[in-house]
Image (cartoon, rainbow, N blue to C red):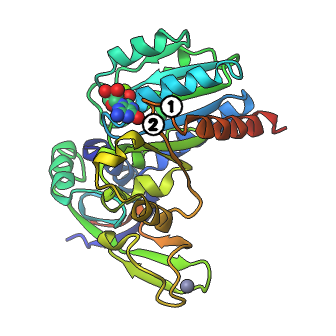
Amino acid sequence: MHELSVTEKILDIVLKHARVNHVRKVISITLIIGEMSDLENEWIQHYFDYLSKDTVAAGAVLKIEKVPIVLKCNLCGQTMEIRREEIGGTCCSGCGKAGDFSIISGREYYIKEMEAE
Amino acid sequence: MSSVKLIEVKEAIMSDNDAAANDLRKRLSREKTFLVNLMASPGAGKTSLLLRTLAALKPDFNMAVIEADIDSVVDAEKIAATGVPSVQLRTGGFCHLDAAMVVKGLEAIDTASANLVFIENVGNLVCPAEFDTGAAMDIMILSVPEGDDKPLKYPLMFSKCRALLVNKIDLLPYSDFDMILFKQRVYQINAGIRIFEVSCTSGEGITDWTEWLKQSVNRFLEKP
Ligand SMILES: Nc1nc2c(ncn2[C@@H]2O[C@H](COP(=O)(O)OP(=O)(O)O)[C@@H](O)[C@H]2O)c(=O)[nH]1
Ligand SMILES: [Mg+2]
Ligand SMILES: [Zn+2]
């Protein structure tokens, strides 16, 4: 799994912002992750605890906010939220057609904010 | 006592890799090298497809292959036997390639003369989806025995590829793979994707794929 290298990237970004903001200690970090991505909460925290030892981010809690998959019908403009298992199994709730959608959300992969002192 | 403050970060987790990938794409665009990132599960047919594709396009392009699949020493040998230069990347058990690793792999390739380079990415449908390699085109293989439900399990991968090769269609008569349902699932999260039904064993459907790729590469090479 790619959690280890992802965690390294998260830590790098967090430490950069900690420096700029003259932070003494990072308390929590909020990640925004779309439902299309796989990111195991448990592993991320585990790796983070390991990698952040001896930094201002040691002990920080990672919070993951999941963003649902939202499709927009290219024919009638209707948007709808679906679960992964529903991919391909749903028709547009506006016009009833099954074919032509754009992904509006569900691919998010970023750090939203951090609490620090 | 110090007070707790909220710091807005709003930064993509992959921002450094995304930047490296964009730099590489710009460089390869200047050097007129079309980089194709091939992703699939282990055993789906990445090496088999490369062998077919290299054979078909040998008269048209100056090609090279970056091998990154974990146990692909054999694959590298098979590719070498075609006469197309290949580089074996040491991924150290990594589950994916990132742009920096691709840059390293390209060092061993003469990109000034190569105009079509393939990456055989690590066999995995999850991790490579998150890492932009700097390729001009992402493509994937899904083989019939893997089942028609894979777009539900790995939506990100299916949503980011320009082309999808459904391989091992020679096995369709022995499987419950529902091609219509499968395509419906794929199109719902990627309306613009090109789907090719192929068999690397029998060669069925390969020409449709290689002709389409050839046109895509030519368009890229002819861009001013
Ligand atoms: N029946 C069938 N087998 C195939 C086809 N393409 C590849 N294979 C077999 O699938 C296995 C794995 O193929 P390979 O190209 O090494 O997959 P990779 O791990 O993705 O590089 C090999 O035994 C191939 O001979 C196909 O179209 N039909
Ligand atoms: Mg292989
Ligand atoms: Zn509609």
Q: Where does the image place residue B198, in percent across and percent down from the top left? A: 48, 40
| Residue at the (18%, 55%) spot, across then down | A45
Q: Amino acid at mark 2?
A: Ser
In the displayed structure, A112 sits above or below B224; it is below
Tell which subunit mark 2 falls on. Answer: B
- At label 1, counting other C-alpha atoms closer than 10 Å, the crowd grade (few under 14, some 14-19, many 20 or more) is few
- Judging by the rendered image, the residue that carries numbered circle 1 is B203
- Judging by the rendered image, the residue that carries numbered circle 2 is B199
Q: Where's ligand 1: which quadrant?
A: top left
Q: Are marks 2 and 1 in contact (CB under 8 Å)?
A: yes
Seen from the viewer's position, the closer of residues B84 and B224 is B84
| Residue at the (49%, 27%) spot, across then down | B50
Seen from the viewer's position, the closer of residues A72 and B56 is B56
| Residue at the (59%, 85%) spot, across then down | A77
Residue A107 appearing in the image: no
> In the picture provided, is B83 more to the left or to the right than A35?
right
Direction bottom: furthest residue = A94
Q: Secondary structure at mark 1?
A: loop
> In the picture provided, is B61 more to the left or to the right than B76?
right
- At label 2, counting other C-alpha atoms closer than 10 Å, the crowd grade (few under 14, some 14-19, many 20 or more) is many
